[in-house]
Structures are given as C-alpha cells and as structure tokens.
Amino acid sequence: MAFVLGIDTSNYTTSVCLYDSEKKEIRQQKKLLPVKEQAIGLKQSDAVFHHTVQLPGLMEALAFAGAVDAIGVSTRPRSVEGSYMPCFLVGEGAARSLSAVTQAPLFRFSHQDGHVMAALYSSGSLELLEGRFLAFHVSGGTTEALLVTPEGNGFHCDCVAKTLDLNAGQVIDRVGVMLGLSFPAGRELDKLAGGCEREYRVKPAMKGMDCCLSGLQNQCEKRYREGEGKEAVAKYCLCYVAGALEQMTQGLLERYGPLPLLFAGGVMSNSYIRARFTERFRARFAAPDFSSDNAAGVALLAARAFLGANP
C-alpha cells in the first residue's frame, strides 16, 4: 500500500493529485490560471505568480492527513534536452521541499510523460506499457505524434510528426476568443460547434506528415468577417484540426504499421474529434478529466517507480 502525491504546474493549470495504491483511487484538485478577458495567454512571470498563489490552497483541499510515501512532479514540458518552462519550477520547488521534510522519495517526469500515463490509465490501456505504441499529445502547448517505448520509470518518446507553426490548442483558443468566448476556449468552442450540422471538406496544409495550422486562424477570421455564423466557424475550425490530425495518423500507420493509438491533451477531449477518431481508427482516449492538464499522470508514474509495478 502506498499514498503517492503528484504535482503539476503547467500552462494553464495548477493541479495536485493523491493516488491510493490499495484502493486504486485518485483524488484530484486543479484550478485554471486566471487570464484576463479577451487575452489569449499569460506571460510566464504571471503564470509563476498564479501557481505560487494557487498551489497551497489545492494542497489543502486534498484534505489528506496521512503520510505520503512517494512524490511525483513534472519539471519540464517534454523529455528532450533543452525543454524548459519557468512555471514548472513552482511545482518542483514544492515537491523538493516536501520530499526533504518527509523523506519520501521524489520522482521527476516531463509534463508530456504525465499526459501519456494519464491517458493509458484512464482509457484502461495499461497493457500498452509492454510495448511500443503511437501517442498524440495535442494541446495549447504541444501538437506532436510520438513513437513511445516504455523505458525505466517513464517513456522514451520519439517525435515522428508535429505542427510546424501553431499548436492545435493555440488556434482553437484564438478562434474561440475571436468569437467572443473566454480563454481557454476549447470546451466552449466544442459546444458552439455542436449547433452546426454541416460537415466541411477541408484540405489541411501538410508537409509530409507534419501539419501547418496558422492558416486556419486566417481562414476562420475571413469566414467570420464575411458573415458566417459563430457555430459554423467553430465547426469549420474543428473539422480542419481533425482533418490535419487524421492525415498525420494515417501516414504514421502506413509507416510504422498497425500500432495501438493513444490520444492525450486537452484538444483530444473535444467530443467531435473523439467521435471521428473512434469511428475511423478505434483510437484510445484519455477520459475527459484526464485529457486536460492534470497531476494524475505524474502521480501514477511515481507510484509505478516506487512500487515496481503498474498502478
């Protein structure tokens, strides 16, 4: 039996998690960072400040009075050299302090590794830890397809396809804010698009298996200026993103063979995109609460490292 704490301080969510290995229970507390109305992001200095303010309250909300046996924390966006973002220093500093006081071992992971593990766990796909699989991490900060091999306490991830400009979550947020939605706009844009039954035939800009999404923002702005309704613009945006991801997926399956497909990241919680990929590729998805940024993945990875077995 072990109680494992997870901490993640990413853009744009502060999150903590407690995993009970005996009951197989996860308790999460998370809170979006505040973004001013009509803004499309935060400066890193502001993100660091808000994480520093929010993290203690979330820890208190876990209401855990026992001893923590191990701690997991995300310390960088991805597991590649040079991957760095100041906001992760808040979580790492808190985790190091707790580890020093409690003597609980500290395990460090990337934010991306946490997303992959959360998706494996919440989709009931832990058996994929026995071999290679393809994982898409699609969010405001990342749009990558990864060839994943479980390695040590985490994963070895080779980026095999990606966006060459804007991330999918970035363009969705920008289009959403243009349409008067609040940032981050993913959930509201999903609901808005549900009011449009039209299916758009799109031709995403691709270079090999990489996609280019910056032109989508311009197309959506043009459609809106010319009088197209908000629901239709939202649907067009999602059709385009889904089309680009489909072309990436099809190309990777042709190159690497029928490997299992796993999708993680906030964009992949979109109901329209999930339905398309479930029907066409029988893909596996993180449960909605595990798709957006969360500390559950790093807690589960730490539990796996501490216990020497899958959670």
Image (spheres, helix red, strand yellow):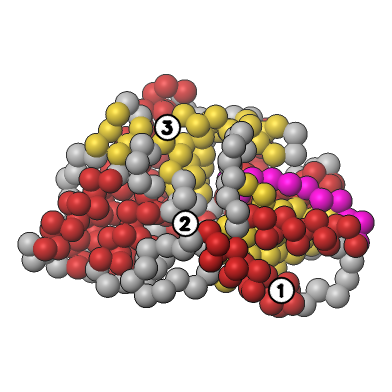
Give the percent coordinates (x, y) of residue 221. 18, 58
Q: Which residue is disc 2 drawn over?
A: 266
Q: Which residue is disc 1 drawn over?
A: 56
Q: Residue furthest left?
A: 226
Mark 2 and mark 1: Cα distance apart in space: 24 Å
Which mark is in front, 2 or 1? 1
Residue at image coords 75%, 62%: 94
Is 20 on the left or on the right of 39, as rendered? right
Instruction: Answer few, some or many: residues within 10 Å of disc 1's Cα (few below 14, many 20 plus, some between 14 and 19).
Output: few
Q: SS at mark 1? A: helix
Mark 1 and mark 3: Cα distance apart in space: 38 Å
Instruction: Answer few, some or many: residues within 10 Å of disc 2's Cα (few below 14, many 20 plus, some between 14 and 19).
Output: many
Which disc, if any, is residue 161? 3
| N-term mark: 2 or 1 | 1
Q: Which region of the structure is painted magenta?
A: 102-112
Residue at image coords 65%, 69%: 52
Residue at image coords 46%, 23%: 257
Give the percent coordinates (x, y) of residue 124. 61, 50
Does the magenta segment cover residue 111? yes
| N-term mark: 1 or 3 | 1
In this orientation, which residue lies closer to the viewer: 68 or 249? Answer: 68
- Give the amino acid at mark 1: Pro
Q: Can residue 46 be seen at all in this image of the molecule?
A: yes
Which mark is in front, 1 or 3? 1
| N-term mark: 3 or 2 | 3
In which quadrant of the rendered view does residue 194 lie? bottom left
Give the percent coordinates (x, y) of residue 186. 38, 63
In this orientation, which residue lies closer to the viewer: 157 or 78? Answer: 78
Give the percent coordinates (x, y) of residue 130. 67, 33
